[in-house]
Image (cartoon, rainbow, N blue to C red):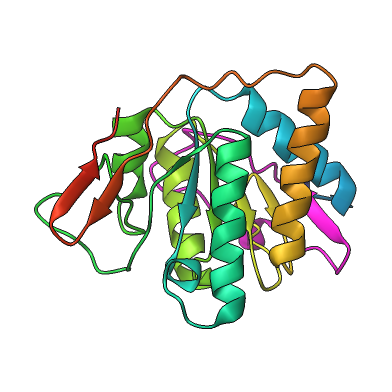
Amino acid sequence: MSHYEVKAGPEAFLPPAAASMGNVLPDPGEAHIGGEIVPEDEAYDKAARMILGAKVPTIFPGPLVLWKLNEHSNAKAKAIRELALEAPMRIIPMADYRPKYPKIEAAVEINPNHPNLTIWHNKIDVCIFIGVHCHMANLSLKIIRGGTSCYTIAMCAMAGHEDACLSFRDADLTMVNKLKATIQKLKSEGVKSQAVPFTQFVMNRSGFVVEPS
């Protein structure tokens, strides 16, 4: 079976699962880019360059980091916020997985059952999934690859995601900080962020504290 390249779409109404095309997950110390197994350090550099080169780079944190389940999730959430500030990147949460009909608030949330709506609305060209349960991340990644041109990066705490354009495995606090350090290194070498200026929204139970721009 020839190599199946996992790349930004739009690919098809129903893109194939990368695993069904023969792609495998990386071993510890490895990552994958486009379905090819590479050393982890190569993936850090590629991810950082994609983030800095994007117009609307965005982090989609899921329930595993949004909710303070334990001290590790709390520390990881803070590191994600620091990563977003360094790049800079927008943050749009995936707070839960329930389908939301007739519509979602695409400016401030993403849902795994129709993630393309958030990507289209915000014109997101590079995104990071982190803290999303594996089965819901894989669902989202296939839909995004099928119907959008967004480049997907998955920082998975388990074995990785073959349906992402680029995927890390065993993503812990150290790995989030290493990605931030790689971005800092590239910026110190003269690589500039191409992100469109924005204001990160802030919400509480009553609604907006700071509205998105």
Q: x, y (%) of residue 79? A: 62, 57
Left or right position of 199 against 169: left
Give the residue displayed 54% in from the left and 51% down from the top: 81
Q: x, y (%) of residue 70? A: 53, 83
Left or right position of 130 against 31: left
Front residue of 35 and 212: 212
Q: x, y (%) of residue 73? A: 56, 73
Q: Residue furthest bottom?
A: 70
Q: Residue furthest front?
A: 209
Give the residue displayed 73% in from the left and 54% down from the top: 177
Q: x, y (%) of residue 34? A: 72, 43
Q: Is residue 182 above or below residue 138?
A: above
Q: Is residue 24 visible in the rendered structure shown here? A: no
Q: Is residue 115 above or below residue 183?
A: below
Quadrant location of the C terminus in the rendered image: top left
Q: Find the magenta span and give its range.
A: 4-32
